Image (cartoon, grey):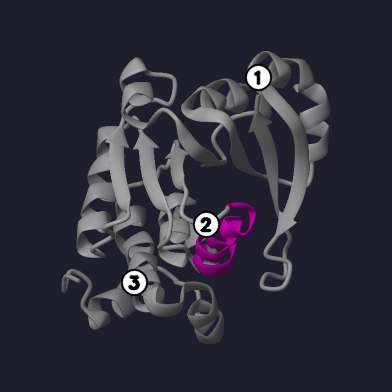
Amino acid sequence: MSEHFAETDYNEAGLGASPEPAELVERVFGANADKAREYHRWLAQEATVRGLIGPRETPKLWDRHIINSAVVGEAIGKDLVVADIGSGAGLPGIPLALARPDLTVYLVEPLLRRTTFLSEVVEDLSLSNVIVVRGRAEDKEVLEKVGGVDVVTSRAVAPLGKLARWSLPLVHSGGVMVALKGSSAGEEIERDSKIIQKAKGLNPRVVEVGSSILDTPTYVVIIKKK
């Protein structure tokens, strides 16, 4: 990994980074714990400077963003191919790839400045199981590159109905979309049920993940493709 982040520079940046929950980081990321720490530094320093993460989010990076994203792996089977759409600064895709090195993860993001950031992080952390793809989930080019994956993930991208229209075409029949949502996820399912069905989505359900790790529950909506 690069020396892009000298420890003194990081500490003196005045960014108010959250204290590291060391035991939890080791537990969640295992052999990739040091890479998770380096990713935290990328978010706390570079992502804030580049406008990818709001400065007010910096104190919450570990629990609200990095570990919150990693626990999505509880809803994903082994040795699968995942597309993370609207990946932004790499959430949840990069923490997921770090916590679950058995997964192959595509980071799908339309904005150049974000894909540039993602490519730099992937190279710096030597993430051989991560591929950055520039484009929108609904683009023909993206469908040709990553279509037929096992799982599509997303976080804070769009309302559930719109997410289903974007996500499910990328998933093979029998695959699933796994979308991080808030406590109102059940209401979104009810509101957008017809759109989900039209997108060939089956049996939408809300699942809580990370309950043994995080104080604040993390909810994901899982929808299977017909």
- Spot occupied by residue 200 in the image (x, y as percentages of width and height): 65, 19
SS at mark 3? helix
Q: Can residue 4 be spotted in the picture?
A: yes
Q: Quadrant of the C terminus?
A: top right
Per the image, the residue denoted by label 3 is 35
Q: Residue furthest left?
A: 3
Q: Can residue 89 be spotted in the picture?
A: no
Mark sitting on residue 78: 2
- Spot occupied by residue 75 in the image (x, y as percentages of width and height): 64, 53
Per the image, the residue denoted by label 1 is 200
Please name the amino acid that badge 1 sits on. Lys
Quarter of the image holding residue 224?
top right
- Spot occupied by residue 87 in the image (x, y as percentages of width and height): 42, 42
Task: Please tell me whether mark 3 or mark 2 is closer to you in this view.
Answer: 2
- Spot occupied by residue 33 in the image (x, y as percentages of width and height): 41, 77
Please name the amino acid that badge 3 sits on. Lys
SS at mark 1? loop
- Above or below — where is 225 with respect to 68? above
Residue drawn at the location 35% of the way across and 46% of the way down: 51
Q: Is residue 158 left or right of residue 216?
A: left
**Which span of residues is magenta-colored?**
61-76
